[in-house]
Image (tube, helix red, strand yellow):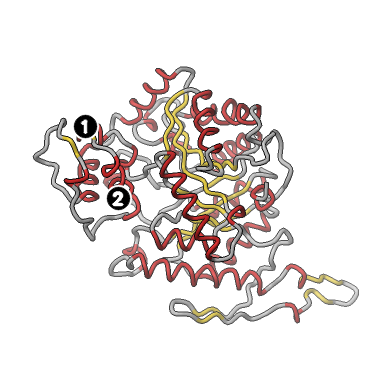
Amino acid sequence: MNDRQLCVGLSLAVTWFSGNAWRRNDSHVEDILNPTYYINIAKLAEKAHVDFLFRPDSLFVDPKALSHSVGFCALEPTLLMAAIAPHTSHIGLLTTASTTFNEPYIIARQLQSLHHISHGRAAWNIVTALDGHQNFGLPHMPDVGIRYAKAKEFAMAVKKLWRSFPHEALTIDRNEGKFVTSELITTPDVRGDYFSVKGPLSVPMHDSGEVPLFQAGASEEGRDFAAQIADGIFAACPDIDSAKSYRDDVRARMQKYQRNPNKVKVLPGLSLYLAASEEQAKALYLESQSSLDINRKNQFICDSLGIDITQLTEETEICASLIGPLPDHVRSRTHSELLRRLVKRETLTLAELRKRPEVSASAHWQIVGTVEQAADEIIEWFEKDAIDGFIALPGGSEESLKLVFEKLLPLLAERGYFRRQYTHTTLRGHLSE
C-alpha cells in the first residue's frame, strides 16, 4: 500500500451519452431525468469505494445544440444529490452552484441542508459560469476579473454564514426548555462590493465540520482563487506536462497564502473509453465521435487561434507562427489558451488538430484502451506528481462506466494505489487520506 492514495470522483454529467453514444440502443438515454437511474449508478460507485460523485451544471442551454446532443439537459444538481443521499452512506456528493447568478444565503442554506441530509458528505463546486446572463436579467457576462472578485466575496460570505450557527449552539435541553445556546449564534452582517448579508443562517453547521470546497480554476484569476479556498480542484489537463505544471503552480500559490499544499487535491477530468481490447476501445471512441459537428470544431479553432482556416487544406500545418491575438469574444479563455499552448508546442495538420481533445473545448485527459492501459497511465501520472487523483468521465457507452467500477478501480486497489474499503463516512474524511 502506498502512503499516498488516489482520490477518485465520478462525473454524473452522463459523459457516456456524449457525441453519438446516446443513440445506442443500450444507452438508457430515456432515463436522463429519472433520479432512480442516478441512484443506481451511485450505489455501484459506492460499492467501488469512489470518493465522491460530481454533478457539473450550466444555467444555459442551446436548443440548436440539444437537437443532436444531450448536453446540459439535466436535473438541478443539489436536488439530485439530495435524492441520492438517503440511498448511500459513504460516497461524497459534490454539487455545483454559480456565484454569478445566485445569492450567498440561499446557497449556504442549500449546502448545509445537503450536508445534514447526507450526514457530512456534501461538497460545493464553486463556478463563476461562462454564459446564461440572459436568464438573470444581465445585459452581458461580467468580465473574468469581476466574476472572480464576486466569487471570492460570495464564498467568504457563505463560510461566515455557516459559522454563524455552530453545531455546538444546538443545545436541545428538554428539562431546561433550551433549544439553542443563543450566545453562540452570531450575526456576521457581511457587507461587500457585491453582496450584503446579515445572517445568521437558519441551519446549524453539521457536526462533521465545514462543507469542502471545490473549484475549476484554470485562468490566472481562477488558479489564485482555487489556491486560496479549495479543498479540491477540477482541472483540464490534456497531457502529463500540463498536469504537472498546473499542480506545481497551484501548490506554489497555496504556500503564498500560507496554506499547506498537501491539503488540496488536484483532480484532472479523465475521459475514459474502455473496452476488452485497444482496437475495440478505438472503435468505440470513433463511433461516439462520428456525429460531432466539424463546423463547430472549425469555429473553435478560428476563434481560439485568431486565424481564418476556411481557405486551408486538411494537410496545412498549423504552427505557432500562424497564431493571432486572442479575440475578446471567446466563450472560454481557459479552453482557448489550452489550444493555443498545444499549437505552440506541436505542429499539426488541420486534420490532426481537429482530432485533439483540446478542440472539443473541454481538453480533458483522455485514455482510449484497455483497463490495464488506463491503470498504467494513471499510475505513471500519479508517481510523477502530476495528479492527486482524477474525476472519471466515462465515454462511448455504459460499458466504460461499468469497467471503471468493476475492473479499473479494483486493479488500482490491487496495485496499492486505491482503497479496498472506506475508512471514513464523510467526504472531508476521504479527502484527508
Observer-nearest of 117 and 377: 377
Q: Position of residue 104 (x, y in %)?
A: 52, 70
The amino acid type, in three-letter code, at marker 1 is: Ala
The amino acid type, in three-letter code, at marker 2 is: Ser
Mark 1 and mark 2 lie on one chain; the one further toward the N terminus is 2
Residue tagged by mark 1? 351
* Relative side of 141 to 227, left or right: left
Work out whether 349 lies above or below 358: above
**Callout 1: helix, strand or loop?**
helix
Disc 1: CA contacts within 10 A as few (<14), some (14-19) or many (>=20): some
Observer-nearest of 179 and 111: 111
The Cα atoms of the two marked residues, 1 and 2, are separated by 18 Å
Q: Image quarter for residue 172? A: bottom right
Q: Position of residue 287 (x, y in %)?
A: 34, 25
Disc tally is: 2
The residue at the point 57 percent across, 81 percent down is 198
The residue at the point 47 percent across, 22 percent down is 275
Residue tagged by mark 2? 336
Q: Position of residue 396 (x, y in %)?
A: 41, 29
